[in-house]
Image (cartoon, grey):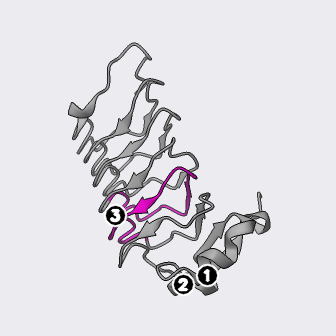
Amino acid sequence: ISLPDNVIVDGNMGYAFAYCKELVRVHLPNNIGGIYDSMFRDCSKLTEVNIPTTVTLMGARAFNGCSSLRKLDCLGNITSIEQYTFAGCTSLTWLRIPSTCTFIAKYSFERCDVLITLIVEAITPPVIEMYTINVVSELKIYVPDVSVNTYKNNSLWSQYANRIYPLSSLSTE
């Protein structure tokens, strides 16, 4: 599905595509301000979605249950990730969180059992709640090189200290 830029997408778009079991790809308009609550919830065949830089809001359960989604390399300019946003994204292996994100709610990555690459671009570690990241043995968290020690020593992120690496060490293969 491709939405043209003249389509108005506003805060009333929660559940807009929820439970669309056959939805595979979505192209969002460049004027969208948010991925609203449950917007793509349980779109189990969704594999690709562009998230424009105009997006600043990532609602609760926005991608909950999108079990075919494998990689999200751009989350716009979101400021927070709400509860259960990516819960049940059981194929998600790669996620890049922009530098604008300052808060990640609990259960955001519940049942993301194959998430092995998490890139957090913020210089200052975002506030995270308990049970935020479902840790799998292969998980590596990449942060800005200048912030590695800050993340490792942060009271909220220190539980992941042995998984935190400088962004420059990320293989681009």
Tag 1: Cα neighbours inside 10 Å, few (<14), some, or many (≥20)?
some
Dominant secondary structure of the magenta stretch? loop
Tag 2: Cα neighbours inside 10 Å, few (<14), some, or many (≥20)?
some
Q: Residue furthest top?
A: 6
Residue 20 vs residue 155, the one in the foreground: 155
On residue 158, which mark appears?
Answer: 2
Residue at image x 40%, y 54%?
Answer: 80
Instruction: State the extent of the magenta-drawn residues as a range.
Output: 85-112
Q: Position of residue 160 (x, y in %)?
A: 54, 82
Q: Position of residue 88 (x, y in %)?
A: 34, 64
Residue at image x 46%, y 79%?
Answer: 156
Labelled pair 3, 2 in contact (Cβ < 8 Å): no
Q: Quadrant of the C terminus?
A: bottom right
Q: Say whether disc 3 or disc 1 marks the residue closer to the N-terminus.
A: 3
Residue at image x 28%, y 54%?
Answer: 60
Amino acid type, label 1: Lys
Compared across the picture, whether 68 is left or right of 62 comes to right
Residue 30 vs residue 125, the one in the foreground: 125
Labelled pair 2, 1 in contact (Cβ < 8 Å): yes
Q: Quadrant of the N terminus?
A: top left
Q: Position of residue 99 (x, y in %)?
A: 58, 52
Labelled pair 3, 1 in contact (Cβ < 8 Å): no
Q: For mark 1, give the secondary structure.
A: helix
Q: For mark 3, give the secondary structure.
A: loop
Amino acid type, label 2: Ser
Residue at image x 43%, y 23%?
Answer: 31
Q: Which residue is mark 1?
A: 152
Compared across the picture, whether 162 is left or right of 6 comes to right
Q: Position of residue 89 (x, y in %)?
A: 39, 61
Q: Which residue is mark 3?
A: 87
Gap in angstroms between the C-alphas marked 2 and 1: 5 Å
Tag 3: Cα neighbours inside 10 Å, few (<14), some, or many (≥20)?
many
